[in-house]
Image (cartoon, rainbow, N blue to C red):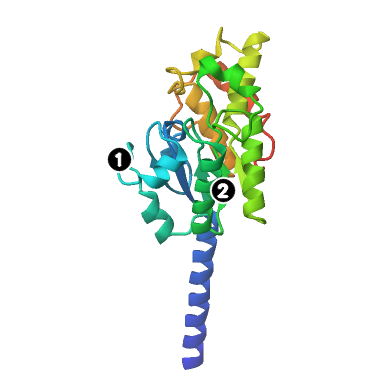
Amino acid sequence: MKLMTWTFLFVSLATFLLSQSEAAQKNPSYFLIGNSLTWDTVPPKLDGDVQWHVDCGKPLAYIHGNPAKPCVKTSTLWPEALKNKQYDYISVQPHYGGTFKTDTETISKWMTLQPKAIFVIHSGWPRHESRAEEWVDTDTRGKMHHSPAYVDALIAELRKRHPGRKFRVTRTQDLVNQVANDIKAGKAPWKDVSEIYRDKIHMNVVTGRYLVHNAMRHAMGQRRSSQGFEKLDPELKAYFDSVLDTLPSPDA
Protein backbone atom coordinates (compact mmCIF):
# COMPACT_ATOMS: atom_id res chain seq x y z
CA MET A 1 0.00 0.00 0.00
CA LYS A 2 2.84 2.38 0.93
CA LEU A 3 4.61 1.59 -2.34
CA MET A 4 1.48 2.48 -4.31
CA THR A 5 1.14 5.75 -2.35
CA TRP A 6 4.75 6.76 -2.99
CA THR A 7 4.41 5.81 -6.64
CA PHE A 8 1.29 7.94 -6.95
CA LEU A 9 3.00 10.89 -5.27
CA PHE A 10 6.05 10.57 -7.49
CA VAL A 11 3.95 10.42 -10.66
CA SER A 12 1.85 13.38 -9.52
CA LEU A 13 4.95 15.45 -8.76
CA ALA A 14 6.55 14.57 -12.10
CA THR A 15 3.35 15.49 -13.92
CA PHE A 16 3.14 18.80 -12.09
CA LEU A 17 6.75 19.71 -12.83
CA LEU A 18 6.31 18.77 -16.48
CA SER A 19 3.18 20.91 -16.76
CA GLN A 20 5.03 23.85 -15.19
CA SER A 21 7.90 23.40 -17.63
CA GLU A 22 5.54 23.25 -20.61
CA ALA A 23 3.69 26.32 -19.37
CA ALA A 24 6.95 28.23 -19.13
CA GLN A 25 7.85 27.20 -22.66
CA LYS A 26 4.45 28.31 -23.97
CA ASN A 27 4.63 31.69 -22.23
CA PRO A 28 7.90 33.40 -23.07
CA SER A 29 8.71 36.67 -21.35
CA TYR A 30 9.28 39.98 -23.11
CA PHE A 31 10.70 43.34 -22.08
CA LEU A 32 10.63 46.41 -24.35
CA ILE A 33 12.88 49.45 -23.92
CA GLY A 34 12.32 52.55 -26.00
CA ASN A 35 10.23 55.66 -26.47
CA SER A 36 6.89 56.46 -28.10
CA LEU A 37 7.83 54.52 -31.24
CA THR A 38 8.02 51.47 -29.02
CA TRP A 39 4.70 52.44 -27.44
CA ASP A 40 3.17 52.73 -30.93
CA THR A 41 3.76 48.97 -31.31
CA VAL A 42 1.20 48.58 -28.48
CA PRO A 43 3.16 46.36 -26.06
CA PRO A 44 0.13 45.63 -23.82
CA LYS A 45 -1.47 43.73 -26.72
CA LEU A 46 1.48 41.38 -27.20
CA ASP A 47 0.98 37.80 -26.06
CA GLY A 48 2.59 36.28 -23.01
CA ASP A 49 4.44 37.83 -20.11
CA VAL A 50 5.18 41.40 -21.22
CA GLN A 51 6.67 44.42 -19.46
CA TRP A 52 8.17 47.65 -20.79
CA HIS A 53 10.16 50.77 -19.96
CA VAL A 54 9.02 53.60 -22.23
CA ASP A 55 10.25 57.20 -22.01
CA CYS A 56 8.97 59.64 -24.61
CA GLY A 57 11.33 61.08 -27.20
CA LYS A 58 14.47 59.73 -25.55
CA PRO A 59 17.38 57.78 -27.13
CA LEU A 60 18.68 54.62 -25.49
CA ALA A 61 21.66 56.21 -23.72
CA TYR A 62 19.35 58.69 -21.98
CA ILE A 63 16.98 55.92 -20.90
CA HIS A 64 19.92 53.93 -19.54
CA GLY A 65 21.29 56.87 -17.58
CA ASN A 66 17.96 58.31 -16.41
CA PRO A 67 15.61 55.44 -15.60
CA ALA A 68 13.67 56.91 -12.70
CA LYS A 69 10.73 58.69 -14.36
CA PRO A 70 9.63 57.24 -17.72
CA CYS A 71 6.69 59.01 -19.35
CA VAL A 72 4.57 55.84 -19.59
CA LYS A 73 3.48 55.34 -15.99
CA THR A 74 2.80 51.62 -16.43
CA SER A 75 6.50 51.08 -17.09
CA THR A 76 8.55 48.66 -15.04
CA LEU A 77 11.86 50.45 -14.48
CA TRP A 78 14.56 48.65 -16.43
CA PRO A 79 17.10 48.39 -13.56
CA GLU A 80 14.52 46.57 -11.46
CA ALA A 81 13.22 44.43 -14.32
CA LEU A 82 16.55 43.28 -15.74
CA LYS A 83 18.03 42.62 -12.30
CA ASN A 84 15.14 40.57 -10.97
CA LYS A 85 14.25 38.49 -14.03
CA GLN A 86 15.81 36.85 -17.06
CA TYR A 87 13.67 37.52 -20.13
CA ASP A 88 13.39 35.49 -23.32
CA TYR A 89 13.19 38.59 -25.55
CA ILE A 90 14.44 42.13 -25.02
CA SER A 91 13.40 44.80 -27.52
CA VAL A 92 15.55 47.95 -27.75
CA GLN A 93 14.80 50.97 -29.94
CA PRO A 94 17.56 53.27 -31.21
CA HIS A 95 16.31 56.80 -31.78
CA TYR A 96 17.26 60.30 -32.84
CA GLY A 97 19.79 61.80 -30.42
CA GLY A 98 21.73 58.57 -30.20
CA THR A 99 24.90 57.74 -32.11
CA PHE A 100 26.42 54.53 -33.36
CA LYS A 101 28.78 54.56 -30.37
CA THR A 102 26.17 55.28 -27.71
CA ASP A 103 23.67 52.80 -29.19
CA THR A 104 26.17 49.93 -29.33
CA GLU A 105 27.56 50.65 -25.87
CA THR A 106 24.14 51.00 -24.26
CA ILE A 107 22.66 47.88 -25.85
CA SER A 108 25.83 45.97 -24.88
CA LYS A 109 25.33 46.88 -21.22
CA TRP A 110 21.79 45.50 -21.28
CA MET A 111 22.96 42.39 -23.10
CA THR A 112 25.44 41.72 -20.31
CA LEU A 113 22.57 41.84 -17.80
CA GLN A 114 20.46 39.48 -19.91
CA PRO A 115 22.90 36.85 -21.24
CA LYS A 116 20.26 34.41 -22.50
CA ALA A 117 17.77 36.81 -24.09
CA ILE A 118 17.19 37.22 -27.81
CA PHE A 119 17.67 40.91 -28.53
CA VAL A 120 15.16 42.50 -30.89
CA ILE A 121 16.36 45.68 -32.56
CA HIS A 122 13.22 47.75 -33.03
CA SER A 123 14.19 49.92 -35.97
CA GLY A 124 11.39 52.43 -35.43
CA TRP A 125 10.70 54.69 -38.41
CA PRO A 126 11.63 58.23 -39.47
CA ARG A 127 9.70 61.46 -39.48
CA HIS A 128 7.69 61.26 -42.68
CA GLU A 129 9.25 64.45 -44.03
CA SER A 130 12.80 63.04 -43.85
CA ARG A 131 12.00 59.41 -44.68
CA ALA A 132 13.42 59.33 -48.22
CA GLU A 133 16.60 61.20 -47.24
CA GLU A 134 17.30 58.99 -44.23
CA TRP A 135 16.62 55.76 -46.11
CA VAL A 136 19.57 56.27 -48.47
CA ASP A 137 21.97 57.66 -45.84
CA THR A 138 24.99 55.33 -45.74
CA ASP A 139 26.77 56.97 -42.78
CA THR A 140 26.84 54.11 -40.28
CA ARG A 141 29.20 55.51 -37.67
CA GLY A 142 27.66 58.87 -36.83
CA LYS A 143 24.27 60.02 -35.63
CA MET A 144 21.41 57.56 -35.48
CA HIS A 145 19.09 57.70 -38.48
CA HIS A 146 16.52 55.37 -39.99
CA SER A 147 18.28 53.47 -42.74
CA PRO A 148 19.01 49.79 -43.39
CA ALA A 149 22.72 50.67 -43.42
CA TYR A 150 22.62 51.97 -39.84
CA VAL A 151 20.69 48.98 -38.48
CA ASP A 152 22.91 46.47 -40.29
CA ALA A 153 26.07 48.15 -39.00
CA LEU A 154 24.68 48.26 -35.47
CA ILE A 155 23.91 44.55 -35.45
CA ALA A 156 27.28 43.70 -37.00
CA GLU A 157 29.06 45.57 -34.20
CA LEU A 158 26.90 43.91 -31.52
CA ARG A 159 27.69 40.48 -33.00
CA LYS A 160 31.37 41.29 -32.81
CA ARG A 161 31.07 42.25 -29.16
CA HIS A 162 28.74 39.40 -28.24
CA PRO A 163 29.53 36.36 -30.41
CA GLY A 164 26.92 33.65 -30.41
CA ARG A 165 24.07 35.91 -29.33
CA LYS A 166 20.79 35.96 -31.28
CA PHE A 167 19.36 39.13 -32.77
CA ARG A 168 16.09 39.95 -34.48
CA VAL A 169 14.82 43.07 -36.24
CA THR A 170 11.29 44.50 -36.41
CA ARG A 171 12.00 46.07 -39.84
CA THR A 172 9.28 48.65 -39.21
CA GLN A 173 11.20 51.32 -41.11
CA ASP A 174 11.36 48.95 -44.09
CA LEU A 175 7.58 48.49 -44.00
CA VAL A 176 6.92 52.23 -43.88
CA ASN A 177 9.29 52.69 -46.80
CA GLN A 178 7.44 49.98 -48.74
CA VAL A 179 4.11 51.73 -48.12
CA ALA A 180 5.64 54.96 -49.47
CA ASN A 181 6.88 53.14 -52.57
CA ASP A 182 3.49 51.49 -53.08
CA ILE A 183 1.79 54.89 -52.88
CA LYS A 184 4.16 56.23 -55.51
CA ALA A 185 3.40 53.25 -57.73
CA GLY A 186 -0.36 53.59 -57.25
CA LYS A 187 -0.59 50.30 -55.31
CA ALA A 188 -1.62 51.72 -51.92
CA PRO A 189 -4.87 53.54 -51.01
CA TRP A 190 -3.35 56.87 -49.94
CA LYS A 191 -1.91 59.94 -51.61
CA ASP A 192 1.01 60.32 -49.21
CA VAL A 193 2.72 58.14 -46.61
CA SER A 194 1.99 60.79 -43.98
CA GLU A 195 -1.59 59.51 -43.95
CA ILE A 196 -0.59 56.47 -41.89
CA TYR A 197 0.98 58.85 -39.35
CA ARG A 198 -0.97 60.89 -36.80
CA ASP A 199 1.68 63.63 -36.61
CA LYS A 200 5.24 64.13 -37.85
CA ILE A 201 6.53 60.84 -36.44
CA HIS A 202 3.89 58.77 -34.64
CA MET A 203 1.68 56.16 -36.27
CA ASN A 204 -2.05 56.65 -36.75
CA VAL A 205 -3.81 54.84 -33.91
CA VAL A 206 -6.11 52.82 -36.18
CA THR A 207 -4.01 52.25 -39.30
CA GLY A 208 -0.27 52.62 -38.85
CA ARG A 209 -0.23 51.02 -35.42
CA TYR A 210 -1.69 47.81 -36.85
CA LEU A 211 1.29 47.56 -39.17
CA VAL A 212 4.00 48.18 -36.58
CA HIS A 213 2.29 46.14 -33.85
CA ASN A 214 2.31 43.08 -36.06
CA ALA A 215 5.89 43.74 -37.15
CA MET A 216 6.85 43.56 -33.47
CA ARG A 217 4.82 40.37 -33.05
CA HIS A 218 6.61 38.86 -36.06
CA ALA A 219 10.02 39.72 -34.59
CA MET A 220 9.04 38.11 -31.29
CA GLY A 221 7.74 34.93 -32.86
CA GLN A 222 4.05 35.70 -32.30
CA ARG A 223 1.14 35.20 -34.65
CA ARG A 224 -0.42 38.17 -36.40
CA SER A 225 -3.34 39.67 -34.50
CA SER A 226 -6.09 42.21 -35.13
CA GLN A 227 -7.18 42.40 -31.49
CA GLY A 228 -7.70 46.04 -30.63
CA PHE A 229 -7.82 47.06 -34.30
CA GLU A 230 -11.42 46.13 -35.02
CA LYS A 231 -12.11 49.61 -36.43
CA LEU A 232 -9.54 49.15 -39.19
CA ASP A 233 -11.20 49.14 -42.61
CA PRO A 234 -11.10 45.57 -44.03
CA GLU A 235 -9.56 46.74 -47.31
CA LEU A 236 -6.82 48.63 -45.48
CA LYS A 237 -6.21 45.62 -43.25
CA ALA A 238 -5.86 43.42 -46.34
CA TYR A 239 -3.33 45.85 -47.78
CA PHE A 240 -1.31 45.98 -44.55
CA ASP A 241 -1.40 42.19 -44.34
CA SER A 242 0.05 42.01 -47.85
CA VAL A 243 2.88 44.28 -46.73
CA LEU A 244 3.47 42.21 -43.59
CA ASP A 245 3.56 39.08 -45.76
CA THR A 246 6.77 40.39 -47.33
CA LEU A 247 8.67 40.29 -44.03
CA PRO A 248 11.54 37.81 -44.14
CA SER A 249 12.59 35.68 -41.20
CA PRO A 250 12.98 37.98 -38.21
CA ASP A 251 16.44 36.63 -37.46
CA ALA A 252 19.03 39.27 -38.32
Task: Count residues near mark 2 (Cα–Cα under 10 Å), then give few for <14, some for 14-19, many for 20+.
Answer: many
Does residue 16 appear in the picture of this structure? Answer: yes
Q: Percent x, y for residue 23? A: 50, 59
| Residue 28 visible in rendering | no
Q: Which residue is mark 1?
A: 73
Q: Position of residue 71 (x, y in %)?
A: 32, 36
Camera-nearest residue between 215 and 104: 104
Picture quadrant of residue 150: top right
- Alpha carbon of mark 2 to alpha carbon of mark 1: how far? 24 Å
The one nearer the camera, 156 or 80, is: 156
x and y, in percent, of residue 26 in the image: 54, 55
Type of amino acid at the residue the image marks with label 2: Phe
Q: Quadrant of residue 228?
A: top left
Q: Nearer the viewer, residue 60 or 223?
A: 60
What residue is disc 2 on? 119
Q: Quadrant of the C terminus?
A: top right
Label 2 or label 1, whichever comes before in sequence order? 1
The answer to whether 213 is drawn above or below residue 87 in the figure is above
Secondary-structure class at tag 1: loop
- For residue 150, the mark is none
Say which element carries label 2.
Answer: strand
Q: Give the percent coordinates (x, y) of residue 249.
A: 68, 40
**Residue at 54% in and 17% down:** 130
From what the image shows, is residue 184 above or below residue 176? Answer: above
Q: Residues within 10 Å of mark 1 (few under 14, many from 20)?
A: few
Query: How many numbered marks are there?
Result: 2
- Residue at 49%, 58% in the rendered image: 113
Q: Amino acid at mark 1?
A: Lys
Q: Is 43 above or below relative to 5?
A: above
- Identified at 54% across, 68% down, the residue is 18
Farthest-out residue, bottom:
2
